[in-house]
Image (cartoon, rainbow, N blue to C red):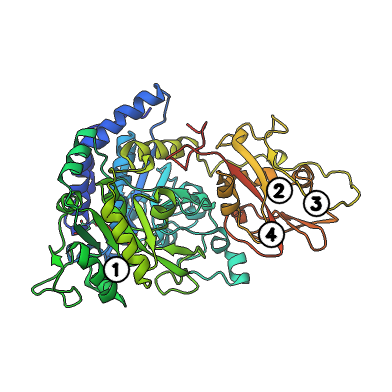
Amino acid sequence: QAAFRSNLSHLLELIGSGKESLIFMKKRIKQLAAHWALAARRLEAKLKGARRDQKQILIHIGFLTEESGDVFSPRVLKGGPLGEMVQWADILAVLFVLGHNLKITVSLKELQSNLGVPPGRGSCPLTVPLPFDLIYTDYHGLQQMKQHMGLSFKKYRCRFRVIDTFGTEPAYNHEEYATLHGYRTNWGYWNFNPKQFMTMFPHTPDNSFMGFVSEELNSTEKQLIKNNKASNMAVVYGKEASIWKIQGKEKFLGILNKYMEIHGTVYYETQRPPEVPAFVKNHGLLPQQEFQQLLRKAKLFIGFGFPYEGPAPLEAIANGCIFLQSRFSPPHSSLNHEFFRGKPTSREVFSQHPYAENFIGKPHVWTVDYNNSEEFEAAIKAIMRIQVDPYLPYEYTCEGMLERIYAYIQHQDFCATIEPSLLVVPPQPARAPTALAPNATHLVWPHNASLGSEAWPPVHSLQGWLSETGRTCTDTCLDKGLICEPSFFHFLNTQDAFLKLNVTCDRTESEMNHLYPAFAQLGQECYLQKEPILYSCAGSNTKYRRLCPCRDFQKGQVALCRDCL
Ligand code: U2F
């Protein structure tokens, strides 16, 4: 049985030392230790002693291994990406606090020894039982395990959880389908259940939202921050000088400089980076805690368009800043932008930080066109006039993350095979073709209560909706105030579901297509999905109205439905 832990010192020993990246992660865990302990107490009380099995968990951080080139560790103190380190530190803390038994590896040698691969052997024999219930890794780690686990890689694939910042859409995950239809990725086609990929923000309901945390403030701290704000102080988002190379910077920074004193935390070795204008007060790259202190004083945190979707804007908002960012028109994606090229997603990014824009929004987040000086200046003037409270969405608090990962470990089981009889609905008798009823409404489950009683999320949270032509299921559900839930697709992948939605099919075909189940108005054809791992909330085509499984969600905890705990 797993018991909550509130003392993290053993975790710090497990992490080892040496690399700057590990030092950064340990420092972060220490700084947040009291917050984790408090969160553990709160969640324990909420769960009222529910029984939890203690899992054996391997955490293999592939991008930090020498064998993958470890490009991140040497850049920790030089303004390089820290977002990944922030997230892994928090994942380690969560799994440890939840009371599981952890093995942590950041080298191939340690990985092999934990997998029971004898030294010098390329891969472990099939007969070696895997001593772990769960393996958390990343794309680099996955590649290494594929090489060294031999056939057991396939056998135990359902135990993997892949930390994947920007997400993997089902069309890119299915090897045969991706190859046939040109869904190219640099990261491999793994044929996993797409929910095994875990993202940094809840941007792709096809994947699981892992997240990270930001420090939660109590009401005294919040008040103190409000009292001490310097109303004309702005901090620029960008610790690497290259971020400051953006075109048109002189114009919008010139406007901002009329109203505010501009600060930066740009890494430099000996001289001030030439990209940073003289009127900017540069502090150099700061240790994380000092950076938070700077945010506590500042009124505004301003993004230049890169990095995409990092932790810093959430920290800024949590410390009472307003986050100002640029709108992207046209949106950036793997189809038109170098940074996203080769990433296994076609998601369109409409601003530097879509989560901040869509899940938080005004007054904390302002998204404007930086090329439009009037719009930019108007935003600055409006921001100067308002006061905001520090704000942190629940899902980014220690308790929120702990609760979410607790629920995943308790309920997500990708090894269980679902009884085929539960999925197949007997063919319906043929009916005379009729047009789609103009007021076709949604389908509420269960229309057959015995079906899917074992499902998680519980199936009574399911609502089936028919999308408008050319809309994704992600957007269709959001329009209804719901979230797309891919694990419910199989309940809708039936002729019966079409009938219940007043769709009459002249013909029904079953094919491999990530947009199915769907209805093509032209020809009154219905299409069922033949390949369960291709079920996808993402994706649209003007030919189809898609059949979308939506569910409710908890406010501030989008990963969980109301009855999900
Ligand atoms: C993101 O990576 P970044 O490291 O560029 O993300 P940031 O939002 O800048 O924040 C990472 C952390 O850096 C800290 C700050 C954040 O938690 O507290 N920090 C600091 O310690 N000292 C400073 O002076 C300034 C910030 C994203 F997370 C990655 O997944 C992406 O790969 C990358 C590119 O899009 O962007």
Identify the residue position indicated by label 3 in the image: 436
Q: Residues under labels 2 and 3: Cα distance?
A: 18 Å
- Determine which of the numbered discs, if any, sits on residue 493 in the image: 2
Q: Earlier in the sequence, mark 1 or mark 4?
A: 1
Q: Residues under labels 3 and 1: Cα distance?
A: 56 Å
Q: Mark 4 packing: few (<14 Cα in 10 Å), some, or many (20+)?
A: some
On screen, residue 266 versus residue 361, left or right, reads left
Can you say which quadrant of the picture contains the N terminus?
top left
How far across and how far down the image is residue 276, in percent? 18, 73
Q: Mark 3 packing: few (<14 Cα in 10 Å), some, or many (20+)?
A: some
Vertical relation: 96 (above or below) 263: above
Q: Earlier in the sequence, mark 2 or mark 3?
A: 3
The reply to whether discs 1 and 2 touch (Cβ–Cβ < 8 Å) is: no
Identify the residue position indicated by label 4 in the image: 469
Depth check: 286 or 305 in front?
Answer: 305
* Three-letter amino acid code at the position of disc 1: Gly
